Amino acid sequence: MPRLRPRFARRILVLNDHPVELALFQNMLAAMGYRRVIAASDAAATVAAVARQPHDVVISDIATGIAGSASLLTELRGMGRVPPVIWTSGLGEELLQSHVRLALEAGSASVQALPMPVSAAVLQAAMETALESLAASQEA
């Protein structure tokens, strides 16, 4: 059975093109004990970060557009695995659900959609779900 990294060692990638929201996610994750949070403000920076090293969970605002989301998912799939994805958006449930379908089609075992604004409690529950699915996929 693979050895699972503790929470503080998990690599979390956050994509959000709004600096205040990006900082909010970083602060909430830090308060939850995550110390390896990589922040990116556009899809190109996110894809570059993913290409450098794998991440355990990707949290992405979908305001970067479907092309940015698709390129991110393509890059993740090209690396051999699509980690759990947590989509965020204030643009409506239909758009969130279309991104859920995209990530599932790309091969992510866990995809969640969180309407903005996201509270710390909702984010923590989403992270726990994502890490549980990651642990289950690593045990399989």
Image (tube, rainbow, N blue to C red):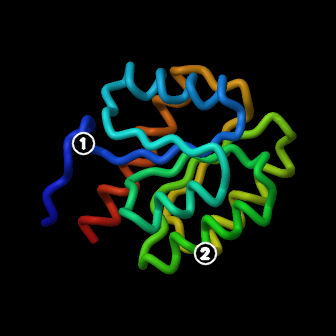
Up/down of 106 relative to 109, above or below? below
Residues packed near mark 1 inside 10 Å, few (<14), some (14 to 19) or many (20 plus): some
Residue type highlighted by circle 2: Thr
Up/down of 119 relative to 103, above or below? above
The residue shown at (66%, 56%) is 43
Quarter of the picture holding the C terminus = bottom left
Up/down of 29 relative to 64, above or below? above
Question: What label does residue 74 carry, if any?
Answer: 2
The residue shown at (34%, 65%) is 137
The residue shown at (47%, 58%) is 49
Residue type highlighted by circle 1: Ala
Q: Position of residue 116 (x, y in %)?
A: 73, 30
Q: Where is residue 13 in the image (x, y as percent from the top left)?
A: 48, 47
Q: Name the residue under label 1.
A: 9
Q: Where is residue 67 in the image (x, y as percent from the top left)?
A: 78, 66
Question: What label does residue 85 carry, if any?
Answer: none
The residue shown at (57%, 45%) is 40
Up/down of 117 relative to 76, above or below? above
Towards the viewer: 80 or 44 = 44
Image quadrant where residue 2 sits: bottom left
Give yes or no for contact between labels 1 and 2 (Cβ–Cβ under 8 Å). no
